[in-house]
Amino acid sequence: MILQALNDYYRRKCDASDPAQRLPRYGLEQKEIPFLLEISPEGELLQLRDTRELNGKRKVARVFRVPMGIKKTSGVAANLLWDTLEYVLGVDTKGKPERVAEQHAAFRARIAALPDAALEDAGIQAVTRFLDRIDLTQLERQPAWEDALESNAVLSFRLQCDQDLVCQRTAVVSAALNVSIGDDAPQAMCLVTGEQAPVERLHASIKGVWGAQTSGANIVSFNARAFESYGKAERQGENAPVSQAAAFAYTTALNHLLRKDSPQRIQVGDASTVFWTEHDSDFETAAADIFGDPPKDDPDRSTNAVQAVLDAVQSGKWGRSDETTRFYVLGLAPNAARISIRFYHCVTLRELGHRIAQHFDDLSLARGSYDPQYPSLKRLLQTVCLATSSQTFGDIDRLPPNLGGAIVDAIFESENTPYPALWFNAAVGRCRAEQAKKTQQGTQAQNVPYVRAAVIKACLNRQIRKTNLSAPDHLIEKELLPMLDLTNTNPGYLLGRLFAVLERIQENAAGGGGKLNSTIRDKYYGAMASSPGIVFPTLDKLKVAHLKKLPWRQKEWFEKLIGEILGDLPDIPRQLSLPDQGRFALGYYHQRQDRPPKAIDDSSTPSTTPNPAEGESV
C-alpha cells in the first residue's frame, strides 16, 4: 500500500506543470554535481567549474538530472558520465592506486558499452578524447582543483557552449533509458503494479531520514537468510518482487518528499514524517504547516493553516480538491542500514479535517492573550520537559524519541484514540516537580502553564471518550470543558480549585502576589496534588491566618466559595490517582483563570458567584 501510493505520487509529479517540481523519468535521477569539467569538442579542458553556491554558512552544489546511479557496495561499479573524481579522472585520493585504476577503467568501460548511435554523439566523442589524454598539470592549475581533490567530489562533463551536461544530451538519455532495464533481470509479477516485469535486485537508497546512514538506507532489503523467502536464498530483491520501474518510482518520490527544505516534511522526534495527497491539493503542505514550527518571517503561517482546515470542515469546501481525495502520512525512523515504518495513515481529506479539528478542540482551553491558540507539536512536547533556569522552554531531546511520532499517530488514527500515556504522565509529573522561577520577562513561571494544562485536558478527554464507548449509561463521564466547570464534582478537580482559591487568599492577604517571594503553590503543590489528605490540615490552618488579614467583604466571598467547593467534596481523599492528579492540575488552572469580581478586590459590594473574565496566563 505504501509503495503503491508513492508510485502513484511519482506518476503525478512526472507530469507536473512546474518544471522545478517535475520528477525525472525512469532511468534518470536528481543529483548534486559540485564540479563540472568543461571541455571543447576536441577534448581540451577549458575550466573546472564550481557549481556550489553559498547557502547560509555552507556551500550547496547545483542539482542536475543525470542517468540513474548504480547502487554501490564494496565492489567497483561506475555511473554513466558522472561519478567521483577517482572514477572520472583515475586520480588516487585515499592511497589505493590499484583500486582507483580499476574504478577509472570501469568508468571508461561504461561509456564504451553505449550503443553505436550514442558513441557517435559529439559530446561522447569529446569526453573520450579528454579521457585519452588527461593532463593533471592543467587540472592542478584550476582554482577549484584543491577543493575537488580533497573531498573526492562528484564530477561530470559539459561541452563548450552547451547548457546541458553531456550526460543530458538526447542520445545519452535515450541510451540510459534503454540500458536501465537489464535483459538478464528475472521476470516476475510486480507487487506494486501487478505487471510482469524485470525485478529490481537492489533498490535505490532512501536519503534524508534523520539518524539513518548518510549514504542512505532501504525500506526493501534482504541480506540474511532470516529475511529470505522459500527457495530464494541469496537472491535479494526477488524475495519481494518489485519491478525496476516501480522501484525507481517509489524511491524517487520518497527522496523528493524527504529533500532539504521540503514543504511536505517535518521531523517528529525520531520519525522523519512526510505528507502527500492523491491528487493536486491546496492541503498537500497543510500538515507540515500545522504541526511544524512556523518560520520566523511568517509566524502566523501555522495559525492560518489550521484555520483553513477548520473552515474547510465547516463549509465542506476543499478548494481544488474533493473531500474524498486521499491524504497520506508516513513516518520513517532509522534502523541501522534499513528504515523502519514508524506509522502510516491513509485518510480522506474530510477525515483529515475532522481529526485535526478534534485534536485542537481537545487542546482548547481558556488562555491569556499571549498564549498561542493552536500550539505547535514542538511546544506541546517542550511543555512536559525539564527547563533550566536559563531556558524558556524545555529540551525535547530529553524525551523518548518515539513520543512525538506516537502523538501524531494518535491524531490521524481516529478522534477516540488516546494520546500516549507517557505524554500525560510527563505533563502531570512536571506540574508536581516544577518550581517557580523567574522568566526572561521577569514574571514567575507557574506549575500549570497554559500549554501543559491543554495537554492534560486533551489526554484526559481522549481517554474519557474511549472509556465511554463501552461504558453503561450510568457510568458515562462528562468530558472536561475549556473553562471552569462548576458542575464537575470529581475530587481531584475540586481539590485543584480549592488549592487555587487558597493561593488567591494568601496573595490578597499579602496585598498582591507580586509582594510574595513564594506562595503555598511553591511549597505544597506537589504534596496537595498527590496526597491531599496529609497536607490539607496545614493549608487549612494557613487559610484561617490569611483570612484574618482580608477586608470582611473579601473574607465573606472567599469563605462562601470555599464552602461551595467543599459542599461537593464530602471528605478529603488521602491520595489521588494519576488521572485525578491531572484533573487537580486542570481544576487549579481553571480556577486561576476565573478571577474574582473586581468589586471583591476593591472590598465593595460582595458577590455570591465568581464572574469569568479575560484569563490571566497561569
Image: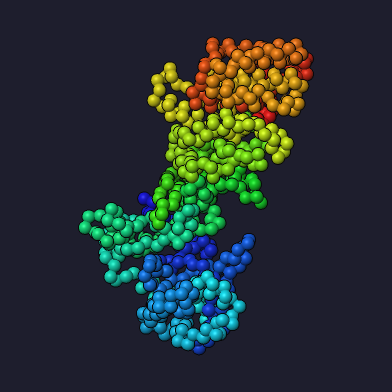
Q: Position of residue 167 (x, y in %)?
A: 46, 76
Residue plotted at (54% across, 31% down)? 429
Which residue of the protein is positioned furthest toward the front in this rendering?
Answer: 95
Q: Which one is nearer the viewer's eye here, 234 or 329?
A: 234
What colour scheme has been applied to the protein in the rendered image? rainbow
Q: Position of residue 534 (x, y in %)?
A: 56, 17
Compared with 530, 110 (above or below) is: below
Q: Position of residue 38 (x, y in %)?
A: 54, 80
Q: Which quadrant would residue 535 be assigned to in this image?
A: top right
Residue plotted at (65% across, 36% down)? 371
Residue plotted at (42% across, 69% down)? 69
Q: Position of residue 156 (x, y in %)?
A: 49, 75
Quarter of the figure that contains the C terminus: top right
Q: Which one is nearer the viewer's eye here, 295 or 220?
A: 220
Compared with 467, 69 (above or below) is: below
Residue plotted at (45% across, 66% down)? 29
Compared with 420, 254 (above or below) is: below
Q: How many numbered discs sit on the rendered protein?
A: 0
Q: Which one is nearer the viewer's eye here, 84 or 341?
A: 84
Which residue of the protein is positioned furthest toward the left in this rendering?
Answer: 231
Residue 405 in view (yes/no): no
Compared with 324, 451 (above or below) is: above
Q: Which quadrant would residue 107 be assigned to in this image?
A: bottom left
Does 241 sit left or right of 79 as displayed?
A: left
Residue 441 in view (yes/no): yes
Does 570 sit left or right of 555 as displayed?
A: left
